Image (cartoon, rainbow, N blue to C red):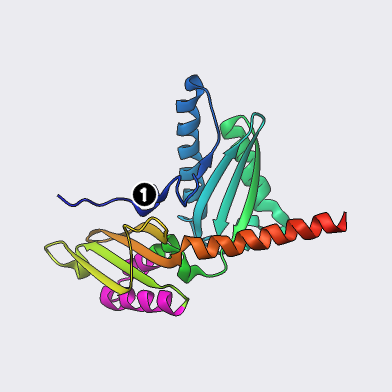
Amino acid sequence: MGQKTHPFGLRLGITEAHKSRWYAPKALYGELLVEDEKIRKWLDKRLNRRPPNAAVSDIHIERTREELKIIVKTARPGLVIGPKGAEVERMTEELQYMTGRKVAISIIEIKNTDMDAKLVAESVAEQLQKRSSYRRAVKMKCEAMMAAGAKGCKIRIGGRLGGAEIARVMEVKLGSLPLSTLQANVEYGTAEAHTTYGVIGVKCWIYKGMFTTERTEEESNAAGGRARARGRK
């Protein structure tokens, strides 16, 4: 049996934070958990599964007693916001109706799409749906990730590749990928390509370097900013 672990789940609580951040009593917990999943599926269907594709890679949910805050990470913020913010307002209203709570949506832009595992997997799946060469699509994406600054990457596709009778698996790996190192910043994303001859699964891993060096720089910058703010006061 393969002893495989989800890279995000393995690091959760050590170097990664939860994607749903709230506390609830036992009686409410199940209801809110189902609501979170419902929100994620609804947003994914609305923003990622209909043209034009808004390239949403992640949805974080925070709750207070009064408010439900949804943080959307997207490569195309303009499509999510809409002209003069009309699309965001429409989504906010629909989510308020759906959940019965006060909703606030905030958007974070993804600057580099080749360094986001979910978006890379979706891009490969899209190319497979368009019947382009699967070997070329995977190889090109891996090279693009390394060129974008990744220290290592791997793409694995499985299914009836090229319409073959027997399903098989193909993977391309470049650079290093320390999956069992907890301090390693490894991002993982999956997608599905729905082709005429069946579903092809796409998995993507990106190794961005160790957490310690990146985090300390960020923390020192934040601390410096706080110190400067105190100095102004």
Residue 135 magenta-drawn? yes
The residue segment tinted magenta is 123-147
Instruction: Judge left or right: residue 14 versus residue 199.
Output: right
Q: From the viewer's perspective, is residue 136 above or below residue 194?
A: below
Instruction: Please tell me which residue lies in front, 142 or 202.
Output: 142
Dot 1 falls on a residue whose secondary structure is: helix
Residue 149 seen in the figure: yes
Give residue 79's position: percent from left, percent from top: 60, 60
Instruction: Please tell me which residue lies in front, 71 or 46.
Output: 71
**Which secondary structure dominates the residues rendered in magenta?**
helix
Image quadrant assignment for residue 176: bottom left
The residue at the point 59 percent across, 49 percent down is 71
Instruction: Judge left or right: residue 123 versus residue 56.
Output: left
Q: Name the residue under label 1.
A: 10
Residue 60 magenta-drawn? no
Give residue 174's position: percent from left, percent from top: 32, 75
Give residue 173's position: percent from left, percent from top: 29, 72
The residue at the point 61 percent across, 45 percent down is 91
Image quadrant assignment for residue 128: bottom left
Q: From the viewer's perspective, is residue 130 above or below residue 64?
A: below
Residue 79 seen in the figure: no
At label 1, which amino acid type do we have? Leu
